[in-house]
Image (tube, rainbow, N blue to C red):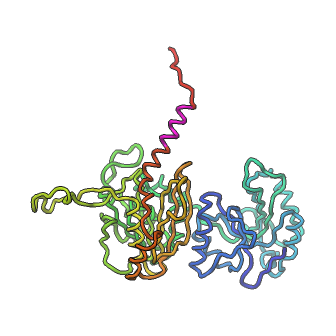
Amino acid sequence: MALHCGKTFCQYLLHLAHDNVDFRLPEIKSLLSLRGRKCDPPENFKERSPFWRLNGLSEDDVHSVMSRTVCAKSAFELWGHGKTAAELKSSLLEYPKERMTPFLQQESTYKINVYTFNKTLLFKDRIEKINALDFLPFQGKVNLKHPDHIFCLLEDYGLDPNDIPEEPFYIYFGRWIADGQRELIRSHSVKKRHFIGNTSMDAGLSFIMANHAKVKPHDLVYDPFVGTGSLLVACSHFGAYVCGTDIDYNTIHGVGRASRKNQKWRGPDENIRANLRQYGTEVFYVDVMVSDASKPVWRKGTLFDAIITDPPYGIRESTRRTGSHKEITNPPENLFGESHVPVSMVYHLSDVFADLLNFAAYHLVLGGRLVYWLPVYRPEYCEEMVPLHPCLRLVSNCEQTLSSHTSRRLITMEKTKDPEESDALQQLANPRFTPNQGHNSFREKYFSGITKKSTAKAMTEPPQTKKSD
């Protein structure tokens, strides 16, 4: 039960938020890899638990992670843990005194918090638990408002709110080090955003995507389906220069009908640049432009440190690309002249993902990451449906449930090599490298599920009778 702690490395405890559970481990791993560290949990590690013990880290590593994570609430230097109060006491008594002493001095102040997961304790019960720690050699004075050091007793009562035990399954005690960046979810909420659209990305997920992509200061980040720029806002917060493209002229230029309730038309200053200005990161705004993702305008070569995007699924926004009817009709030469507007054609999801992966292979720097959303029909989903590429390594695959029959998966890939001529042959020979046509029917399956649900509800509900006056 003893914690082995040297001068630099000891065991730390992360308290995780219990939302976006699938995204937590990839985020922490990505943030640690920015410092050249690996996530080293103990053998009995439970990914869905709200508490994680991590080994082999320094306090600087932990501060670095907590300065960016939106999945973790708080971090602690773990002094003791156990399944019972007796085990916790034994563990605390074995903790190296030289690690405790600097924080227990007579001239310092402190306070002890009690946190319980999945159970609410009465105030008197919290006080009793704090008093039970009187065997610890605290010499300073208690200061509840502005203490020099904060300690926390954390109790885990399991994940089932319908079966809460009398006693906790596990107990931890440690010194508070830092809080995560959960505040960003509130401060960057799209409800307060100056410029929004029908598909503006949730603030929390935007920051998670930026963390999965390992976005860091001075990176150049690109979004090929930029929309209203929610992902650019998150990346610029971490000091990256941002740019993007979109086929929708009105969205890029901030004109046309507004998406905000009780507002008919967009104002003259509603645009992506204004969103970055709202959060004080306009200096990182490179530009956005109208462009077709199926026909990239970028010069050949590695340009971007990260590509982060949310491709349209054809639900709220259509999947379109530019094209021509010349195959069907041949209009007179120079009929349209310079005012010709390209024809809008269907852009199949299978082609969207194939083009996206190919673009990333050619334009990401080595080690750069591609992070994007893949919509799936859950009854038919299997790992073979995730698009692959010879130059990209699959890093993580996280699910966000949308309904009983649909979800979307956050796919993170890392570029491992530059494209070669042999890759084209490999893509033809290996079925995992060919576009999965099953994605093309996602729209129909999405709406068929809604129709079935509505029909079932109508059949189970009793008919309503009209009230007489």
Q: Is residue 455 magenta?
A: yes
Residue at the far bottom in the pictured view: 7
| Vertical arrangement, residue 466 with respect to residue 335, above or below | above
Indicate the position of residue 185 as horizontal and vertical percent values: 55, 59
| Vertical arrangement, residue 194 with respect to residue 24, above or below | above
The stretch of residues the image draws in magenta is 450-459
Residue at the far top in the pictured view: 469
- Kindly identify the residue that appears in the image at 60 percent across and 62 percent down: 22
Residue 383 visible, this angle: yes
Indicate the position of residue 10 as horizontal and vertical percent values: 74, 79
Q: Left or right of 241: which side holds 29?
A: right
Indicate the position of residue 446 as horizontal and vertical percent values: 47, 49
Q: Quadrant of the N terminus?
A: bottom right
- Kindly identify the residue that appears in the image at 54 percent across and 25 percent down: 463
- Kindly identify the residue that appears in the image at 84 percent across and 64 percent down: 83
Q: Left or right of 370: which side holds 421?
A: left
Of 9 and 420, the residue lying toward us: 420
Of 26 and 63, the residue lying toward us: 26
Indicate the position of residue 462 as horizontal and vertical percent values: 57, 26
Q: Is residue 466 magenta?
A: no
Q: Left or right of 265: which side holds 397?
A: right
Report the predominant secondary structure element of the magenta stretch: helix
- Kindly identify the residue that appears in the image at 38 percent across and 63 percent down: 351
